[in-house]
Amino acid sequence: MEEKKFDVQSLIGFVLIGVILIWMLYNNAPTEEQQADPAQTEQVEKSGNTAQDPDNAETAEPAALDSTALAEAKGRLGAFGYSASLPSAKNETTTIENDLLELKVDNKGGYISEARLKNYKTFDSIPVYLIKDGNASFNINFTTTDGRTLDTENLYFEPEVTKNGENTILSMKLKVSENKFLEYRYVLKPGEYMLDFSIRSQGLNGVLNSSQDINMDWALKGYRHAKSMSYENRYTKLIYEYGEGDDDELGQGDLDEETDENISYVAFKQHFFSSILLTDTPFKVGRFKSENLVQDEEIDTVYTKAFAANMPLELNGGELNYNMNWYYGPSDYKILNDYDRNLDEVIPLGWGIFGWINKYVFIPFFAFLSSFLPSYGIAIIVMTIVVRIVLSPVTYKSYLSQAKMKVLRPEINELNEKYKDNAMKKQQETMKLYSKAGASPMSGCLPALMQLPIFYALFQFFPSAFQLRHKSFLWADDLSSYDVIAQLPFHIPFYGEHVSLFPILASIAIFIYMMMTTGQSMQASQQPGMPNMKFIMYLSPLLMLFFFNNYASGLSLYYFTSNLITIGIMLVIKHVIIDEDKIHAKIQENKKKPKKQNRFTRKMQEMMEQAEEQQKKGKK
């Protein structure tokens, strides 16, 4: 699977984690729907006249058809003028629904004009609509053999609703005659957000111009559903799968992209809800566009982004025949993953090892905890405790390295003073000291780096955890959004117009942690070539305070809990496990023993000695 690209906000988060780690390093260093038997299929609802079986129907015009109207319609639409003269040629809708979805399909265009998720509400308790009031469109543009260019969104389809067992079937036919038509067929099953959708034509091989392109256009403007418009918009993006299971996305900003790969699905993702079109016959070419509709975050906006996708359709024997699916539902990893259509890639769990950790560790583990614990907030705390306990050996290694460097610092300072005018010699003697003492400023790097995948994986996990949506804990009424303890009468750039408590607590905890790891080791003067640790110590909590104020409170709760536990573990290591006097005695004992250098250290020392000799010769 192709690695995901960073968006700007993920990059900022990654930099924030990196800043904290620099500090640590410094101190450590469905199966297909079967066709119903016409003899057994029960018709339950229709709009307009009763449709006949196209295989048995005779080609005939309705008896009551106005000949003048028909002639006028055929003059405008050619063969498709027939559909404009039928009783169904009016602005009516047909409703189909199951226990999860309610869909309304217009006669005009034959496409879904309203899609409501029955079990979900927006942040202000309004039902969640993915499609409503003309925010979406679906159109097939084609040319007829008599030279007319037509759009299905402007033509009238004839609806017919039937039942096949518990499945509801809606057939929308754009007719040239009673047995010649273009059909959209929707099959809605109980307990499913995914419905079968097919596009097929019958008897149009002499009507559709095979030498001209047939283009399918799908567009949608995403409604705002969450309390934080900027936060929701950050995770609203267009994603498509192409080739042999690779995927790409159009994230932030205004983007227009074309690919000549085989497109197997297109997803318009609105953070916690998605509209997805899948096809069994990949589209050979696709053109995608994403437009950011939030120009000013201080202004309340109805829509977040506008998405558009254009894919050509190909004729087979002069006819169209595509089996597809629509998904209108939550961006829930478990639901999407269960379809086994690679839809889990719609959820931004992180690229590479970060996504792997989320998929196979954190998602199942969090689901297990939340299945029996009384609240999701407690589940976050318990998961954090377990993560910190698992990483405690790494914390111990880092702190042990820091303790060794603290013991050696007086001798290192002596070398710095003794060879202050000879940087090469100072470096050479310092390396000898590290080698004899069995210590290294880099010995804490690996333990700290081992924590990076964990930190970033959780940074991606919490904003994507659908199960946190509208789940409260303590003063936070929604763990998937920010908590509010005070509403400001003005807007602060990059901060917002509210005050969240969890980010404040997390910032205080990370500041205390940094102060503890610093101790008396922070030098008042900055060493050349080294990061300014005082600046980082104050910058990191400040970045967290601002950056996380609009983030999911569940993520801030994790960082607050994690830092508290880390502080506790470090206190135990410092005062109970590690004895600095014993470390000092051990180092002095190691210094007396002959130390066999590894090849790398020996090579580095030889290079420095050669450089020093060259330097001496150059002075003579």
Image: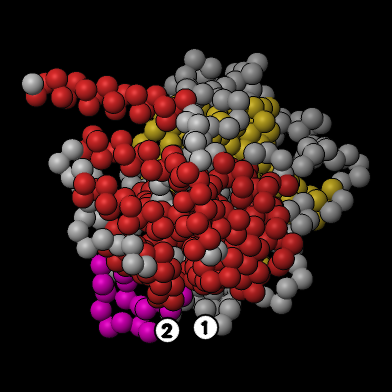
Q: Secondary structure at mark 2?
A: loop
Looking at the picture, which amino acid does disc 2 mark? Ile
- Residue 121, image x, y percentages: 58, 70
- Residue 419, image x, y percentages: 20, 43
149 or 317, which is in the foreground? 317
Q: Is residue 96 above or below residue 594?
A: below
Q: Which mark is residue 485?
A: 2
Q: Secondary structure at mark 1?
A: loop
> Residue at horizontal 60%, vertical 25%?
244
The dominant secondary structure in magenta is strand
Q: Is residue 373 magenta?
A: no
Residue under pointer 1 = 475
Q: Is residue 151 above or below residue 334?
A: above
The quadrant in which the N terminus is found is top right
Distance (Cα) linking label 1 and label 2: 8 Å
Relative placement, left or right, of 423 versus 479 is left
Q: Which residues are magenta?
A: 486-502
Quadrant hosting residue 603: top left
- Residue 511, image x, y percentages: 38, 70
- Residue 417, image x, y percentages: 21, 50
Say if mark 1 contacts mark 2, CB within 8 Å: yes
Badge 1 crowding class, 10 Å Cα cut-off, few under 14, some 14 to 19, many 20 or more, is few
> Residue at horizontal 14%, vertical 20%?
617
Relative placement, left or right, of 2 versus 533 is right
Q: Is residue 286 above or below residue 408?
A: above
